[in-house]
Image (cartoon, coloured by chain):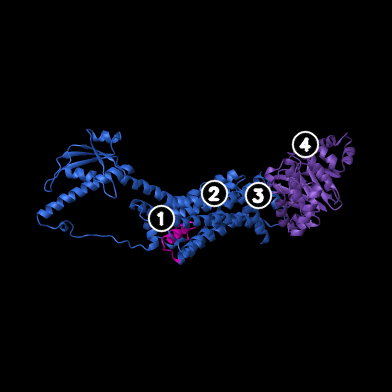
Chain colours: A purple, B blue
């Protein structure tokens, strides 16, 4: 479903992604855990074809992110923490607009809106302009917008950041509800509890490189630490020590 | 093409749901143009005409011949005479506004032709009210008095008054009907049209680019399979259509000016009102061909202005920043449009007509004056469309940048 092979992204001398190699399959929620600036957003934006890689390759649902960018975009839904809505459009108008851009027919659009309304409990939001939405209501429509074309891959980039406690809970419940055998959800966050609650497997990412991939239990066990947070910091310490050794060498 | 229209339709919907944009696009041109082309002339006409019907006070130092006093104070159908009062210091009387003007007899004034006297007129030179009121009436009265004395003397000598004017020069207006009705201040019309196009397009251009980036909707838009060129064309189409709506209402406002003027100006209006209104082009009447030429010119200008606005807005990270970039554009319209009032002195070459926007202003002015030529219209359209195409290419490059969707 998602294959990333030695993917790199550089801005001049700054390497935002360093030879990232990963695989994730449909039916799982795959976490990307890292501090701010670790490279999670760059990785997801590159997979969403909003950024071009400077080295390596990646494919989404069998489509190459460079050569087949349109097909890749047709196969993903993207939600990021900073995403908003058009204040003067209702929830239904937003969904219809994006359905049209994804090439859905009128009948298919209404069918998807109905499905998403049931799945995400949107009935109260469809005919109100987004300007009157609370943060949680907005986030529901943002997620619905990313799912309007029923993509096999959903990329969530710090989607819960900035949300209040109620809206965050709504989002986490939504992600849990969206699990299906046919879909891969990539969930990027710096919050350990979100990973522990949602993710089947995760990659710890720091300084643009993947430090470790596995389940939460595997990561904790391999580190010999008590919990994910301690395991995470141990991985970061090891990376820092290795970097210092290379510098000294 | 369907996606271009999808994007344009959504942009238009959000624009039309914004009351402020609706006001600047529809209401303002519809109200402002008739107001400036009819209302202001009427207001000025009323003010100037009002001076004729007002009895001003004129101070006098010295003795005026009875016939001159009578000439000054006489009421006619067109205007009232002045009231004369004695003053000692004419300058002080004018300055402290005890009188509207003052007369000082420097040397005894003649009551018959043959000798000469000197009369000084005191008023605030440059003050329109004094100029068009008391000073104007005094000049007319003195001229009439002089003419009467000279006429009487010539009659006594059995000579014809025609002796003083061997050649009588009269003026015949050789301008065509459109030129005659367009007025000396017709340059205001292209200024208004282009200004309203700019104002109408600005909200859509900034909201659909910098606004989308600011509220985080551009990232979602760019993550759809729709090509960026399609999205940009949709935004350009929406911006141009909004500008055209503004242009349409401007032209409507313009074409309403003449009927409104006829409706609210009675047939026997004063000459002052009529002259002032004429100067502003208030009695402007465009034929169907003229309206068509103005509309097509406005459309090409709308396309160009939209391309400029979109390109500038793509550099901005917020609507506010975009508005800062756009603000100086107003000068690009106001300065050349203001220079158009001296268009009679300009040698309007083909190059000038091909100059983007400036050519449009000239074509609109020519149309208003009924002097438009086909090649000039084509040149102005070509200049606008060519520059719009170049700017669209630049905007396309900017919109294709990696960072275009992100705030940082």
Mark-to-mark CA distance, 3 and 4: 31 Å
Between the C-alphas of marks 3 and 2, the distance is 28 Å
Quick one: label 2, few (<14), some, or many (20+) residues within 10 Å? some
Q: Chain of mark 2?
A: B
Which secondary structure type mostly characterizes the magenta part of the structure?
helix
Residue beneath disc 4: A165
Q: Residue furthest left?
A: B157
Query: Is B370 inside the magenta-drawn segment?
Result: yes
Q: Is residue B369 above or below residue B64?
A: below
Asked if residue B92 is positioned above or below residue B33 in the image, the reply reads above
Q: In the displayed image of the protein, which residue is found farthest to the bottom?
A: B374
Give the mark, 2 or 1, whose residue is nearer the N terminus.
2
Determine which residue is flagged by label 3.
Answer: B404
Mark 3 falls within which chain? Answer: B
Check chain identity for marks 2 and 1: say if they share one: yes
Give the x, y percent position of residue A172.
Answer: 81, 42
């Amino acid at each position: 479903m998602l294959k990333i092979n030695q993917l790199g992204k550089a801005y001049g001398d700054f390497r935002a992604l360093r030879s990232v190699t990963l695989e994730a399959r449909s039916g799982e929620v795959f976490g990307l855990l890292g501090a701010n600036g670790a490279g999670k957003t760059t990785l997801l934006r590159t997979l969403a074809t909003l950024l071009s890689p400077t080295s390596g390759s990646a494919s989404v649902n069998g489509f190459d992110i460079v050569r087949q960018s349109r097909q890749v975009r047709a196969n993903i839904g993207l939600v990021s923490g900073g995403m908003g809505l058009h204040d003067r459009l209702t929830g239904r108008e937003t969904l219809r607009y994006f359905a049209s851009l994804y090439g859905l027919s009128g009948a298919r659009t209404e069918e998807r809106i109905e499905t998403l309304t049931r799945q995400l409990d949107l009935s109260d939001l469809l005919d109100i302009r987004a300007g009157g939405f609370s943060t949680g209501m907005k986030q529901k429509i943002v997620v619905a917008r990313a799912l309007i074309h029923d993509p096999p891959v959903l990329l969530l980039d710090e989607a819960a950041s900035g949300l209040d406690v109620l809206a965050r809970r709504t989002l986490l419940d939504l992600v849990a509800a969206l699990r299906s055998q046919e879909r891969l959800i990539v969930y990027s966050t710096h919050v350990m509890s979100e990973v522990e609650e949602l993710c089947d497997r995760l990659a710890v990412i720091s300084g643009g490189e993947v430090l470790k991939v596995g389940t939460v239990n595997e990561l904790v066990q391999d580190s010999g630490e008590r919990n994910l947070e301690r395991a995470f910091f141990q991985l970061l310490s090891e990376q820092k020590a290795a970097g210092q050794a290379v510098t000294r060498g | 093409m369907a996606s271009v229209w999808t994007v344009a339709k959504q942009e238009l919907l959000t624009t039309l749901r914004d009351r402020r944009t609706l006001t600047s696009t529809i209401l303002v041109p519809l109200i402002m143009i008739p107001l400036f082309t009819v209302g202001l002339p009427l207001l000025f006409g009323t003010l100037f005409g009002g001076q004729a019907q007002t009895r001003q006070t004129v101070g006098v130092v010295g003795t005026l011949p009875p016939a001159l006093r009578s000439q000054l104070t006489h009421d006619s159908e067109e205007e009232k005479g002045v009231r004369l009062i004695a003053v000692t210091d004419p300058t002080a009387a004018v300055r402290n506004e005890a009188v509207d003007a003052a007369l000082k007899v420097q040397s005894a004034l003649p009551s018959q032709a043959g000798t000469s006297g000197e009369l000084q007129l005191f008023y605030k030179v440059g003050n329109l009210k004094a100029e068009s009121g008391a000073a104007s009436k005094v000049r007319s009265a003195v001229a009439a008095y002089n003419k009467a004395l000279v006429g009487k003397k010539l009659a006594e000598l059995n000579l014809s008054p025609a002796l003083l004017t061997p050649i009588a020069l009269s003026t015949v207006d050789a301008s065509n009907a459109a030129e005659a009705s367009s007025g000396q201040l017709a340059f205001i019309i292209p200024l208004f049209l282009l200004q309203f196009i700019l104002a109408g397009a600005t909200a859509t251009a900034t909201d659909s680019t910098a606004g989308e980036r600011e509220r985080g909707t551009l990232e979602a838009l760019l993550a759809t399979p729709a090509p960026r060129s399609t999205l940009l064309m949709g935004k350009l189409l929406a911006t141009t259509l909004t500008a055209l709506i503004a242009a349409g209402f401007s032209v409507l406002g313009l074409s309403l000016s003449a009927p409104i003027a006829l409706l609210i100006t009675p047939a026997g209006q004063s000459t002052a009102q009529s002259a002032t209104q004429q100067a502003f082009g208030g009695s402007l009447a465009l034929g169907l061909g003229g309206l068509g030429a103005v509309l097509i010119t406005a459309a090409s200008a709308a396309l160009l202005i939209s391309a400029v606005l979109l390109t500038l807005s793509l550099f901005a990270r917020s609507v506010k920043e975009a508005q800062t970039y756009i603000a100086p554009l107003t000068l690009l319209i106001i300065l050349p449009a203001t220079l158009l009032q001296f268009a009679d002195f300009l040698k309007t070459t083909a190059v000038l007509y091909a100059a983007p926007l400036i050519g449009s202003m000239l074509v609109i002015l020519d149309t208003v004056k009924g002097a438009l030529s086909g090649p000039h219209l084509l040149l102005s359209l070509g200049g606008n469309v060519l520059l719009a195409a170049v700017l669209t290419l630049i905007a396309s490059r900017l919109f294709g940048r990696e960072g275009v969707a992100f705030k940082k």
